[in-house]
Image (cartoon, rainbow, N blue to C red):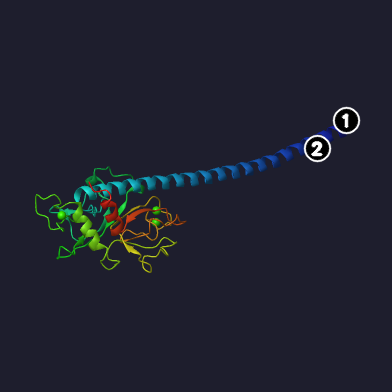
Amino acid sequence: MVRASLSLVGRCARRSQAGLSLIELSVALVVAGLLSWASFSAYETVSAQQQIEKGRAQAQQLQSILRAFALRNGRLPCPDVSAVANGYESLTAGECSSGSQLGWFPYVSLGLEIPTQELRARYAVFRAANADVSLDADLAVSKERTGDSAGEANYLDVTDLIAALKNASVVPLSTARAYLTGDAGPAGVINCGANAVMPAAYWVVVPLQDRDNDGSRMDPPHTMTSLCAASPSAPLRFASDDVVVAESPAQLAGWLRSNLP
Ligand SMILES: [Ca+2]
Ligand SMILES: [Ca+2]
Ligand SMILES: [Ca+2]
């Protein structure tokens, strides 16, 4: 009898031990789940940050190449307006097709390889052609604007682009040409319609991921058809990871003047 009740106590103890370890196991599973969720989120944050660093590096490289091209050719590149993004400037008879002011960055024409989708940049260039060459501000076309003749030192060179940039800086701001909106700070709200801040000689937008889930890698305020870009000083935003580099006509003219060959 004593032995029987002893063995009953033993069974109860074993059962309660089994019960406890089941509770412990489920607690352990929940903790493990939380830990792996936390480390996954941390991983996601880190890799998003790495992506943005990659986008910034890419955008800066494109800006250096644009500036070098401008110094050498006395104009800015013409956008690649092909639907397939083949990487070539959209030229007609060797000149930037009229009206081509927004498209893809012309990688191949500038000696680069076309990068992966998320790094493939949109590009806009300021174009305000004028029949009076002393007022012409078509930055994608090489034109003699400083009265030099063929064979003279400054014939069709960067000084003619600087003249076009000077003209561009006094063309009234228009949303029909490349321009910048604010930066959610000193330059005002990021709103293409309500806050056009300044003309852009060019802007480059590296889209990275589709952060606002609208099916396009471009995020607000950027769209595939808009001539508007956020100011490069705009901070990172929840619904946008797009990276912008841009210069106003005056800024680019200043850079070119201080880097004249
Ligand atoms: Ca000239
Ligand atoms: Ca994006
Ligand atoms: Ca998007």
Label 1 residue near ligand 2, CB within 8 Å: no
* Mark number, residue 33: none
Q: For the residue labelled by badge 2, is the local secondary structure a helix, a strand or a loop?
A: helix
Quadrant field for ligand 3: bottom left
SS for tag 1?
A: helix
Residue 10 versus residue 257 in the image, above or below: above
Outermost right residue:
2
**Which amino acid type is marked by label 2?**
Cys
Judged left or right of residue 187, residue 203 is: left
Query: Mark 2 highlights which residue?
Result: 12
Residue 42: x and y in percent read: 53, 45
Residue 89 vs residue 195, the one in the foreground: 195
**Residue marked by disc 1:** 3
In which quadrant of the rendered image does the N terminus lie? top right
Q: Residues within 10 Å of mark 2 (few under 14, many from 20)?
A: few
Measuring 44% from the left and 44% from the top, which residue is drawn there? 50
* Dot 1 amino acid type: Arg
Is residue 70 something one can see in this rendering?
yes
Q: Give residue 148's position: percent from left, percent from top.
A: 12, 55
Q: CA distance from mark 2 to mark 1?
A: 14 Å
In this rendering, position of residue 226 left or right of residue 76: right
